[in-house]
Amino acid sequence: MLQKNSRKPLSVAGGLFAIVASKYNARYVDAMLRAAKAEILRAGGQVQIVRVPGAYEIPVVAARLARLQTPAAILCLGVILRGATTHAQHIGEAVSNALVQIQLQHEVPVIHEVLLLENKQQAEARCLDKNHNRGTEAAQTALAMARVMKSLRG
């Protein structure tokens, strides 16, 4: 069951939020990217966007950003649609495993919104519907985690 996006205004005192977004399935990913960027900017954060060819390429860029720039959070956005083979499942599992390792190794929140979906209808519901856009949800999680991590520093 999809939950409606919260409209509570979140705020953050500055801070860089990196978004790594796949170019593959651009219609859906671009909608999540626009929503995530708008939510972070509305909260007063700064946004750096890096585009990569597909979901499989997201973790290497996230790792580089975590190591060299240490952003407040890294949002990873992609859409993988299942096909007739198990390829999508393998990509989804590899990306998930890599993102959790990056998060733990670098102690930077990595927000995982690389969606493994059954069909275009699921993608439309999660990416194109403004009330359920997972990009908005990813940004809200990133903002919340940035506050949590900041509170643990001192």
Image (spheres, grey):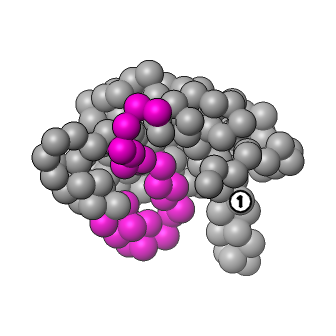
Residue 43: x and y in percent read 78, 41
Q: Residues within 10 Å of mark 1 (few under 14, many from 20)?
A: some
Q: What residue occupies the far right of the structure in this picture?
A: 8
Residue 29: x and y in percent read 45, 31
Q: Residue at image x 79%, y 48%?
A: 6
From the image, tell me which residue sits under label 1: 144
* Image quadrant assignment for residue 5: top right
Residue 82: x and y in percent read 27, 43
Residue 104 shows up from this direction: yes
- Total marks in image: 1
Residue bounds of the magenta highlight: 97-121
Q: Residue at image x 38%, y 72%?
A: 105
Residue 35: x and y in percent read 63, 31
Relative placement, left or right, of 50 versus 109 is left
Q: Residue at image x 26%, y 30%?
A: 53
Q: Of residues 148 and 138, which is closer to you in this image?
A: 138
Magenta run includes residue 111: yes
Could you tell me the amino acid type at mark 1? Ala
Relative placement, left or right, of 154 versus 29 is right
Residue 68 shows up from this direction: no
Q: Which quadrant holds the C terminus?
A: bottom right
**Residue 142 sits above or below residue 136 on the image:** below
Q: Which quadrant holds the N terminus?
A: bottom right
Q: Secondary structure at mark 1?
A: helix
Relative placement, left or right, of 24 versus 123 is left
